[in-house]
Structure formats: C-alpha cells, structure tokens
Image (cartoon, rainbow, N blue to C red):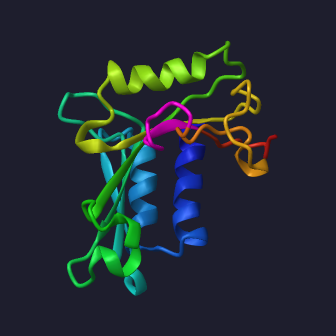
Amino acid sequence: YERWCLVRIISVLIEDLKFAPKVDWQSRVIDAVRSNARSTRLSFSREDLHMEAVLEIQPELRNGRRPDFRLTFRQNDTCQASDIWPPMQSYSTERALVLDAKFRSRWGYDALAATVRDLVDKKGYDEDDARVFILHPRAFAHIPATSPLGWGTHCDYGHRNLVDHCEGAILLSPDGAP
C-alpha cells in the first residue's frame, strides 16, 4: 500500500497539479524501492507559479522518526507569496505535509483520529509546523462523516477538531472506493 501511495502522490503532482519532475526521477524511485533506501528526495517544479515541490520518501525527522512521506512546497525567491496565495501573506513561503500510509481494512470507533493524534503528540511528525495526514484505503472510517461535501465524505481535513486543517486523514484507495 505504501508503494502504491508513492505512485499516486507522484501521479497527482505530475498529472493533476502539473509539476514537472527532474529528469532522473523514475530511476531514483526504482532505486529507492528496490534498495529500501533510508531516505530519497524527488524534486518537481512549476515554473509558471515559481514553485518547487520536494517529495521525500522515508525522511528522517530531527527526532529520529521516519514517516512514509514528506511533501514540501516552496515558493522561489522570484515571486512573492501574495502573487499566488493572497490569504497566505503572513505565512512562510514553505509548507510541508507529512503523510503516513496506514493500510487497514477496518478502523474501530475513533481509532483513525487517535492514530493521527499519536503521530502528532507522540511521534512529533508535526515538526516545523508540518501538516500531518494519514493516507488510508477504508471508506466510512469516519463515523459520522466530518465533511459535508460528497468528495470529502471519507476524509477528515481537520476542520472539526480546532486544528485548522493541520492534521487528519485522507482516503486513498487502490480499488477506487468508496
């Protein structure tokens, strides 16, 4: 599941978000997967937006922990944050998402939310104000649903728990569930 999530993250960056990968990205992914490398970095860019995305596979955090992925978006110096994201004027031009793949066919009541809290409170995945999300393949893992939107029914983007969209869980299913 973790490897499949890696492929989907890369696919979203390239196909949906139109980031261009560096020339050697495919061989780096293959090498990382085949050798179980400790940490691998892949770089992508959007020249039209003056942005870079860096996907780290099994990055080592300062506390020694290793989440599955860290995806960092950076804005190049040639463009101001207000040119692209007016509401983010007061924020840094770098934002990171820590993503941890959890393949489970069932989640007990509130277990998914508790696992997210564990990643933040006990494992410190939120260092440097990174947003922390679990990737999971199970529809209806959030009972009741945390989003009123049809496409968000099986995800928790952190708007109910007073965490300001900084942590939660995202449905990412190989079988196209729900």
- Where residue 24 sits, quadrant-wise, is bottom left
Image position, residue 88 (x, y; %): 35, 64
Quarter of the figure with residue 38: top left
87 to 143, vertically: above or below: below
Q: Is residue 171 left or right of residue 23?
A: right
Q: Residue at x 40, y 77 (%)?
A: 84
Q: For residue 166, which quarter of the picture? A: top left
Location of the C terminus (image quadrant):
top right
Q: Residue at x 56, y 29 (%)?
A: 102
Task: Give the residue furthest to the top.
Answer: 108
Q: Is the magenta region chiefly helix, strand or loop?
A: loop
Give how far across and how far down residue 52 sits, in percent.
34, 70
Coordinates of residue 99 in the picture (x, y in percent): 45, 41
Point out the stretch of residues depicted in magenta. Answer: 160-169
Would you place residue 23 above or below residue 117 in this image? below
Q: Is residue 46 visible?
A: no
Left or right: 112 in relation to 62: right
Seen from this angle, which residue lies furthest right? 178
Residue 175 at x, y percent in the picture? 78, 42
Question: In percent of the image, x 32 and y 50: which residue is there?
Answer: 40
**Which of the two residues, 126 or 28, is positioned nearer the viewer here?**
126
Q: Quadrant of the N terminus?
A: top right
